[in-house]
Amino acid sequence: MRNLLPAMTATLLFATLATAHAQPSPQWSPTRPVRLIVPFPPGGSTDLVARVVGQKMADAWGKQVVIDNRPGANGMIGSEVVAKSAKDGYTLMVNGANFVTSPSLYRKAPYDPLRDFEAISLIAFGPNVLVAHPSLPAKSVQELIAFAKAKPGEVTFASGGPGGAQHLAGELFNSLAGIHMTHIPYKGSAPGLTALIGGEVVVGFADMLITLPHVKSGKLRALAVTGGTRSNLIPELPTVGEAGLKGYAVTAWFGLLAPAGTPADIVNRIQQESLKAMGTPALKERLLSQGAIPSGNTPAEFARFIAAEAAKWAKVVKDAGIKAD
């Protein structure tokens, strides 16, 4: 897989922010609180991004931005709420990869990510880390691939559940490397990480922040980061592509969306406010400390990105025969 996040380089980010600041802002402005739906529980990475961006938008508008967590069904419950909300700018959503993968995984997904939403802007992204239990002899991506080819099905990898981001990251790795690592699902990413640390499984595509302490303590071995670029949190670690698996790049991303049919002037105003928020030093510093890189693009660019992500993961799901229901 090629690097699917060309809008995420620092150069383009700053150019986009500069362009946004140079253009006159549309006149739409909320006159009552805005509801920002997060289709996951409080405390996760999507929730964090939504809260820091929502606060900056509230400051700019002088109106409250209320975070409304609507978890359940791999993010589909909250997404459906947004899809069916009024098209007036007062109901927005921060979502990520699950938003585009769920319709491929579930036979009766209650929304279409391309038809039922207005793309506003990508707002942040960040890689995960490919880690191995010390009992696994492999100390690099190439050694992992060689070991898995020599012992088909014996290498196990953990995920937070069938069809989730970690599962799909592993299946894409299998596909591109021409290997078969066995997927072991757990009820959440935290139990999966615990199993990995305990040696129940030997490989994981894990959240950067919660995994790095275990790498530093020696409980896990980091092989590579999953994104198209290295992480500021562990810059000495190569990407999977750099380490030998060309075309592999899996990045966690977060974007801002509205119901389909929301007027363009409202979408453009919200997009410009989100770009301004992502450009503030305090917000950038906070997100970078969490392993997320502030970003931004136009509604059209974000819509194309969503379409590319949907097509990419639909192929992975089909090729691996994954079904979540």
Image: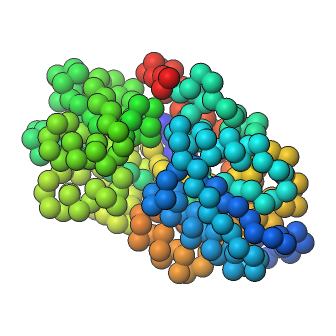
Instruction: Tell me the residue at 45%/23% (across/down).
Output: 322
Residue 137 image position (x, y, % from top left):
11, 39
198 relative to 294 in the view: left or right: left
Taking the image as drawn, is residue 186 in sight?
A: yes
Instruction: Tell me the residue at 41%/31% (across/down).
Output: 162
Q: Nearer the viewer, residue 91 or 244?
A: 91
156 relative to 230 in the view: left or right: left
Residue 51 image position (x, y, % from top left):
57, 67
Instruction: Tell me the residue at 52%/39% (across/down).
Output: 74
Instruction: Tell me the residue at 38%/61% (across/down).
Output: 231
Q: Nearer the viewer, residue 290 or 31?
A: 31
Q: Nearer the viewer, residue 26 or 298?
A: 26
Protein image colouring:
rainbow
Q: On the image, which quarter does residue 279 sit in?
A: bottom right
279 relative to 32 in the view: left or right: left
Q: Nearer the viewer, residue 38 or 13?
A: 38
Taking the image as drawn, is residue 176 in sight?
A: no
Residue 25 image position (x, y, % from top left):
84, 73
Number of dots carrying numbers:
0
Residue 240 image position (x, y, % from top left):
35, 45
26 relative to 294 in the view: left or right: right
Q: Is residue 235 above or below residue 160?
A: below
